[in-house]
Amino acid sequence: MLTLNRSLRAGVAALSLSLLASTSALAGGTTMPSKDIVDTAVSAGSFKTLTAALDAAGLVETLKGKGPFTVFAPTDEAFAKLPEGTVKSLLKPENKQKLTSILTYHVVAGNVKAADVIKLSSAKTLNGQSVSIKVVGSKVLINDATVVKADIATTNGTIHVIDTVLMPK
C-alpha cells in the first residue's frame, strides 16, 4: 500500500509539473523547443510541399542535423503560386539537382533571428547565392517574399515563414 501511495503521489507530481509547464507555455512563458527544423515544419501542417521537396532532394537529414540553420520556409500556399506543374516537375528524380539548388537557396548557415535579419541587407545561402533583405514599413522582404511569421524556434535553428518560393538566379 505504501508503494502504491508513493507511486500515486509521484504520478500526480509529474502530472502537475507537466500541466504547469504547458500552462506557462500557453501563457507566453518561454520553453525550450523540442523539435528540429524538419519535425517543426511537419507538425505545423502548412509545409507539406516543402517537406516533400526536402525528402525528394535528400535534404531531410541535413536539416535534422546539428546546424544551426535559418530557414526561410515557403508555405504550401507559396508553392501553389508557382506555375502549374512546376512542383510536380521539380519532385521528379531527374530534377533533384535543380530542386536542391532551390531549397538550399532558402537556408542560411547560423541562427539568424528577426532582430538580426532586419539589420542585414543580404545573406549568403547554402547554395552559394545571396538573398536580398529589405525592411519596407513593417514588412520584411527576402527578395520578393514577405516574412509572414518570424522566429519559430527549433532545436537546431530558426524558421521564418515566407509567402513566396525563392528562386535562385
Image: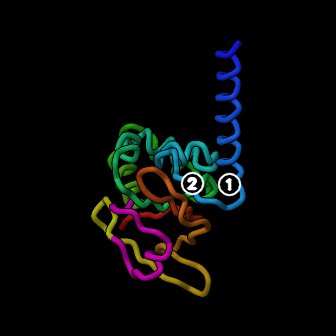
Q: Is residue 30 left or right of residue 159?
A: right
Query: Where 130 sits versus 36, above or below?
Result: below
Label 2 sits on what residue type?
Thr
Tell me if residue 24 can be seen. yes
Callout 2–callout 1 Cβ contact below 8 Å: yes
Q: Which is nearer the eye, 100 or 142?
A: 142
Magenta stretch bounds: 107-123
Query: Which residue in the protein does label 1 denote?
Result: 24
Tell me which amino acid carries mark 1.
Ser
Q: For the view shown, which residue lies furthest in the bottom direction?
A: 137
Name the residue nearer the viewer: 116 or 75.
116
Q: Which mark is residue 163?
A: none
Q: Which mark is residue 31?
A: 2
Position of residue 137 measured from the top left corner of the image (x, y, whole percent): 60, 87
Which coloring applies here? rainbow
In the image: residue 27, left or right of residue 116? right
Quarter of the figure that contains the N terminus: top right
Q: Nearer the viewer, residue 70 or 13?
A: 13
The structure residue drawn at horizontal position 50% and vertical position 45%, both measured from the top left corner, is 35
Where does residue 136 sit, x and y in percent of width and height?
56, 85
Which of the two labelled residues, at mark 2 and mark 1, occupies the earlier sequence position? 1
